[in-house]
Image (cartoon, rainbow, N blue to C red):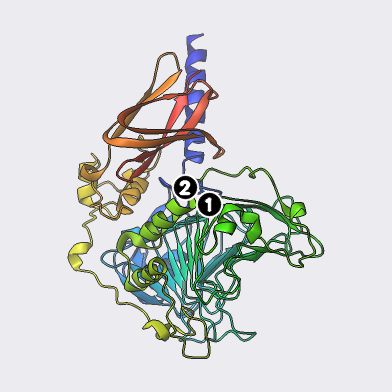
Amino acid sequence: MLKALQLITITTALLLTHLTLAQQPAFPGAEGGGMYTTGGRGGNVYFVTSLDDTSTGNLTTREGTLRWCLAQTGPRTIIFKVAGIIALNSALKIPANTTIAGQTAPGDGICLKNYSTTLSGDNIIIRYMRFRMGDEKAYEGDALWGRNLSNIIIDHCSLSWSTDECGSFYDNTNFTLQWCILSESLRNSVHVKEAHGYGGIWGGKTATFHHNLLAHHDSRNPRMCGSRFSGQPELELVDFRNNVIYNWGGNSGYAGEGGSYNFVNNYYKPSSYSSNPTRIFQPNAYNDVWGTFYVNGNYMHSSTTVTNDNWVGIHPNPTTKSKEELKSLTEFTVPYVTTHTAQEAYNLVLNHCGASKRRDATDKRVINEVTNGLAPMRATLGTTRGGLIDTQSDVGGWDTYSYQASDVPTDTDKDGMPDEWEQANGLDANNASDRNTTAASGYTYLEEYLNDAAKPTSSASTKNRTMLTHYQTNDAKSLVLTSENSIANVTIINLQGRMMLQQSANNNEVTVDIQKLNQGLHLVQITFSNGQTMTQKFLKTR
């Protein structure tokens, strides 16, 4: 009997460990459809040590160009030991099971130019990168794009100066684009069909677009793809919330031909050059297939009427289509996203979106223009709408990105974690295998370092981390959280990403009533009064 009980205990522990790892968010703050993406978790580490765009690298040291690192096999995490511009010689493909940790770049960070970057496999995490394509190579394409994929999350990236769309992501499953800037797509440039200047084509099966800034695009802010390619409107599910849309030209957003859409708490700020300055969205049909829309809480800077009744800002095309046929009175059920009012989101997005660990001059300028309602006339190839540009030289072209040798930390065992960080966390700076050991948080230690490295003001050591403990009371009725920093908000979600409860607080110790939660594993997301966030797991025992 004892052996049987031991076997059951071991089996249960292994099952819980597997389930926990499988459902661990990609990183603290990962939300929406792609929140459980694993990327390169548990795989090898490769180091970008050259800004050249060649296929040169060293398998022994795992160092080389970005293109070489992406060409290696197996799950991989890519860490940068250089900063600057990588001038692509051709389109760049990102394969499956990859984490690109742009937050590890020293100094001013990394920027890609000249050609598109394409998501070419499932299970990809991209953070803190800049994709500023430009038209110097007369190449027609998006700065970053991907479709027909699954489990993707793109976080804190800056996309601009595309000759097609800045970023198009549709027909994907379990996808998130969050805290990104998409700005200044090129209008009269090298696109052969017609003038462009488009933000993006977005959509997917459980696709989330939240806390992004779209600024200075003529149209497609965004264009919702709908089910016109998949032919499965019942599976198209898109959550569009807490985004900021500024200075659209001819159109804010449109289409959505089939599918279910949440438009929740977005902030629309037209300029004097914006056509239809009070329009939130223009639904279209494809083969008489229309989408269904839940529209609520959106703020129209130019119209209290639309702010008070969002459906005044919904303009079906053709206009003979009844709005009532398109309207959902209830919000569609989607994976959890921390949701703010539109006004709160406006400030948060402008303060934190894009490759914001160290913002470059381009992002700073765009943010300033959004903040102050500026749309300067500067296009040189025929565009007559303020704020829109025809070529990157209209706004001065690419920034300079520099770094010092001292910005690159020492990593003796080449496991991706600096020696200083390993020592501070009780690890062995001469043992590369400890990178894939699972920490108490549920992340590998390499992921723990990457999470620390993403903090804008952090030196990526434990002395700067907010410490938090939690325990379940013996009667399983309460969860108690304690921290040296004041806790502002506690959210508990299940492993499917559904919010189960939320509680506001302003205290160092918070007690949460968990009696209504089902037995099993849950995630608790904590927001501190200083703006930091943290995600931990807990097991409700009964």
Which residue is the extreme one toward the top? 1
Give the residue type that dot 1 points to: Asn
Element at label 1? loop
Q: Tell me the number on the disc at residue 177.
A: none
Amino acid on which disc 2 is placed:
His
Residue 524 position within the rendered picture, expressed as x and y whole percent measured from the top left: 43, 34
**Residue assigned mark 2:** 340
The total number of labels drawn is 2
Horizontal arrangement in the rendering, residue 265 relative to residue 427 (left or right): right
Q: Position of residue 200 (x, y in %)?
A: 57, 68
How packed mark 2 is, by other alpha carbons closer than 10 Å (few <14, some 14-19, many 20 or more), is some
Quadrant of res 331: top right
State the residue at coordinates (60%, 75%). Answer: 250
Q: In this view, does 230 lie to the left or right of 331?
A: right
Helix, strand or loop under label 2: loop
| Horizontal relation, residue 308 to residue 110: left or right | right
Instruction: Confirm whether residue 70 shows in the render.
Output: yes
Answer above or below: position of 434 versus 70. above
Residue at 39% across, 17% down: 473
Residue 51: name its quadrant. Answer: bottom left
Q: Earlier in the sequence, mark 1 or mark 2?
A: 1
Residue 458 percent location from the top left of the image: 25, 51
Q: Give residue 265's mark.
A: 1
Residue that lies at the very extreme toward the right in this rendered image: 288
| Residue 233 seen in render | no
In this view, the residue in front, 12 or 209, is 209
Q: Do the residues labelled 1 and 2 touch (CB within 8 Å)?
A: yes
Q: Is residue 269 above or below residue 423?
A: below
Q: Nearer the viewer, residue 173 or 267?
A: 267
Q: Distance between the residues labelled 1 and 2?
A: 7 Å
Residue 190 vertical position relative to residue 121 in the rendered view, above or below: below
Looking at the picture, how far across and down is residue 70, in whole percent? 45, 65
